[in-house]
Amino acid sequence: MTFRATVLTLYPDMFPGALGLSLAGRALEQGVWSLDAVQIRDFATDRHRTVDDTPAGGGAGMVMRADVMARAIDQAAPPGDPRPKLLMSPRGRPLTQERVRELAAGPGAVIVCGRFEGVDQRVIDARGLEEVSIGDYILSGGEPAALILLDAVVRLLPGVMGNEASGAEESFEGGLLEHPHYTRPQQWEGRTIPEVLTSGNHAKIAAWRREQAERLTAERRPDLMPAPHPVTK
């Protein structure tokens, strides 16, 4: 089954962008996944192709219109389309590796890229858009966030990565940050590869990697560390 991505945007030329290169690009050429970038302005009805208007209640900026957005969404995802409808938004639920895996296991996604001050809340509610955030910062639009989401998803599709084990031994996959990596040369600027990694003892190597992952996670992302079990008497 091909993973189908449809992106609704005011800047379709931003796609596939980096997704047309490397593993994702090769998979796109091979038909492992497909990408359709849809111009939202094509669904405006006035001669100026207006997609936004001033915010109700006053304030700075502009808001993307519900009627125009709804026509674009309905064309991209007609009744019966099983794909989730996502809106890239800084107020959305943070994207996690767990959600990425869920999306990669599905039929695809319809991704709405907002601009200006955002999208009229009525179309978010009426079309059941799932708001997704890639971090606590503001971008000029949803397109860069959509590219990041798709990159995270596409690399997990069957056949995209040369070594499937690569996807299972990374940060967040086991609840921890990834352990440090080393490769040749054995010595570089007076620094050597940890001896345990060249010992050939796979049990010791696995234990070292686990220890290092736990140390890095505790230092940098303590929020990811499992809560200690309560002591019972």
Image (tube, rainbow, N blue to C red):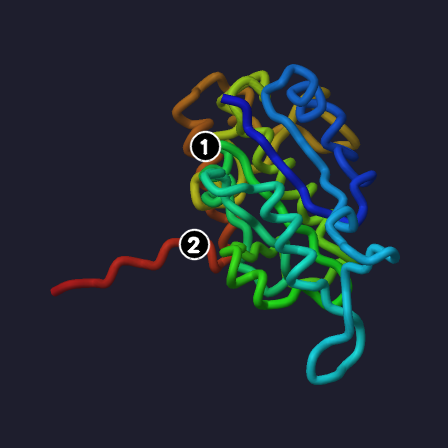
Q: Residue at x 55, y 20 (%)?
A: 198
For disc 2, the marked residue is: 225
Query: Considering only vertical position in the picture, is 35 above or below 140?
Result: above
Label pair 1/2, CB-CB below 8 angstroms: no
Q: Where is residue 179 in the image (x, y as percent from the top left)?
A: 54, 38
Q: Position of residue 215 (x, y in %)?
A: 50, 48
Is label 2 in a helix, a strand or a loop? Answer: loop
Q: Residue at x 43, y 40 (%)?
A: 174
Q: Which amino acid does label 1 sit on?
A: Ala
Q: Position of residue 29 (x, y in %)?
A: 70, 18
Q: Position of residue 194 (x, y in %)?
A: 58, 30
Query: Considering only vertical position in the picture, is 185 above or below 79?
Result: above
Return the mark for residue 202: none
Can residue 109 be seen here?
Answer: yes
Query: Considering only vertical position in the picture, is 153 above or below 130?
Result: above
Which residue is most to the front? Answer: 46
Separation of residues labelled 1 and 2 (CA atoms): 26 Å
Query: Considering only vertical position in the picture, is 138 above or below 212?
Result: below
Asked whether, in this view, residue 110 is left or right of residue 23, the answer is: left
Q: Which amino acid does label 2 sit on?
A: Met
Give the number of callouts: 2
Q: Mark 1 or mark 2: which is in front?
A: 1
Asked whether, in this view, residue 82 is left or right of residue 226, the answer is: right
Which residue is most to the left? Answer: 233
Q: Tell me the crowding category of disc 2: few under 14, some 14 to 19, or many 20 or more residues within 10 angstroms, Cα based.
A: some
Q: Which of 58 and 16 is in front in this view?
A: 58
Q: Nearer the viewer, residue 31 or 230?
A: 31
Q: In the rendered image, which quarter contains the C terminus?
A: bottom left
For disc 1, the marked residue is: 105
Asked whether, in this view, residue 127 is left or right of residue 203, the answer is: right
Q: Which residue is drawn at 69% across and 46% down?
A: 8
